Image: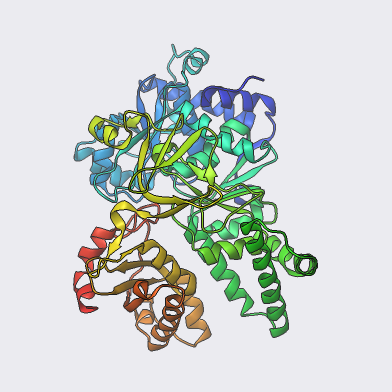
Amino acid sequence: MTRPTTLCEAFQQTAAEQPDRVALRTVGDVVTITWRQYRDRVREIATGLAGLGVGPGDTVALMLTNSPEFHLCDTAVLHCGATPFSVYNTNPSEVLAYQFDNADNRVVICEQQFLPQIRAAVTQGGKVEHIVCVDGAVAGAVHLETLVPAADFDFENTWRSVRPDDLLTIVYTSGTTGPPKGVELTHTNFIENARITEEMGPIGFDDRAVSYLPDAHAANRWFSHYQNLLYGLQVTTVADPKQVLTALADVRPTMFLGVPRVWVKAKMGLDAALEEVSPLRRALARWAIGVGRRRARADSEGRRLGPPDRVRHAIAERLVLSSIRTRIGLDQVKVGASGAAPIPVDVHEYLLALGIPISEGYGMTECTAAGTISRADRIKIGTVGLPVPGVEVSLGPDGEVLLRGKSIMRGYRKMPEKTAETVDSDGWLHTGDIGEFDADGYLKIVDRKKEIIINEAGKNMSPTNIENAITANTPLAGPVAVIGDRRPYNTALITLDPDALARFAEKHGLSGPHGELASDPAVRTAVDECVQNANRTLSRVEQIKTFTVLPEVWEPGSDCLTPTNKLRRKPIGEKYRELIEAMY
């Protein structure tokens, strides 16, 4: 079978190969869709969308939770010769209006719960003519199931006419430094970038992945949706991302992508569980994890354990580590990845100690997703690995990471000047990240060019590294923001993780809403002890002199966090100006 050159061709080949295998499902098999059913539904939906006038060159917006309907609709739009793109469900109406205007989409496919935002966006300038609901008809919107087919639509000829350099999707950046930019990605961009999966080993119908991150994020589309079309791996959708850790035992994924917050919460949950077992079992588990950490460090450094440590590890694996992996549903992972933001080193080492092969990767929407990643045979802690196939990586004079290859975006939609600023005439993508190579050629990301702290004494520091140190040493912590630019010393705003705080409250006999608990002296003392532990891992100039525990929770897509959990530093600085000044 020839290698497909478009995702339409890939889908048709995959569906024909094993039509009776399950392609899409939900937890507990409440919904299962075979490849045959998937193929038939794509034809039906595409024919109905063609009846609304959707055709080659058009764009269609999707505003859906993680569900089988997302995959059905996205793939159907592709088979119309059009371009589907997803928007974050947390987007306010003014952002949606901007995106709809920028994308020129006349059709939105959504769930009823998002209709108020969409309708408000239309009144603010979004050029939308048709709203299609996947979960029933309501006033002003048509039900997906009742679309009138286009009588003259040639389904086969239309999808076969899609070309490799046609637009596959538009991914809107999180907008940490201004309005979201629409990154235009082609079929070739993804298919070239997917070569990294093939390098890591065979992937096919027996593989399983979980789709729980927003599909408006390039990484989730790459890891679940597009690999489903290209390789046939089974996708289980989880509509509520907070339920992903409980879904793992149902899915037992062979491929799993986690953002750092997922891994931090997994470690917090395991640590909390250990506190509930007998002292003997707790001591045994901690011994085994310690042995696992020694193995992880040795593997990271490229050295072989001595015979005594190999024996200890075999015992730890048999008595403890394999059981932990099975308990959390990550016992069958063969390709694991962490991305979107730096993972705390201690958390990464902990996961590797358990025997979960999590490779930290680096990339950005503008290079489709992955630029570098560690391979399973040498996961080097503290680095983001080696270049993926087909991508060149270089450093600019100021240490900026530069990427070049066939997976680099076509450009920003309707922003030729911004495109020229980002991708130079030689094809190098200027990432805005500062990096360095170690002696083995592994890339380390030092920081964002525009996020480096320069204190009053002129010392350059990475706020991300400091924030990760606090997060790794503070089980109660949610997102943390470090302040210190042009200041005499560093301070921090610390939010608390609701689940961790609830466990702490129960253990210490505390009660009350989140905001009250955040100000409890016992909580403050616990956080203070953890921050001091974090300070011991930092240089003196990096250490946190004082901090403020915030009573609120920062949710993804809020004023303080992007939908992908990146800090919105400028809005944070403005919102908490008085609290910040009080710390100085």
* Residue situated in front as seen by the camera: 350 or 239: 350
Residue 497 visible in the displayed image: no
* Quarter location, residue 408: top left
Q: Quadrant of the C terminus?
A: bottom left
Residue 323 rendering spot, x and y as whole percentages? 73, 65
| Residue sitting at x 31%, y 48% | 91
Horizontally, residue 428 falls left or right of residue 325, namely: left
Horizontally, residue 111 falls left or right of residue 252, namely: left
Residue 529 visible in the displayed image: yes
| Residue sitting at x 54%, y 41% | 224
Residue 49 rendering spot, x and y as whole percentages? 41, 25
Residue 248 rendering spot, x and y as whole percentages? 62, 56
Q: Quadrant of the N terminus?
A: top right
* Residue situated in front as seen by the camera: 476 or 584: 584
Horizontally, residue 355 falls left or right of residue 435, namely: right
Horizontally, residue 113 falls left or right of residue 393, namely: left
| Residue 158, placed above or below residue 40 | above
Residue 507 rendering spot, x and y as whole percentages? 53, 84
Q: How is the image coloured?
A: rainbow
* Residue situated in front as seen by the camera: 400 or 125: 400
Disc tally is 0
| Residue sitting at x 60%, y 45% | 209
* Quarter location, residue 280: bottom right
| Residue 345, placed above or below residue 39 | below
* Residue situated in front as seen by the camera: 91 or 523: 523
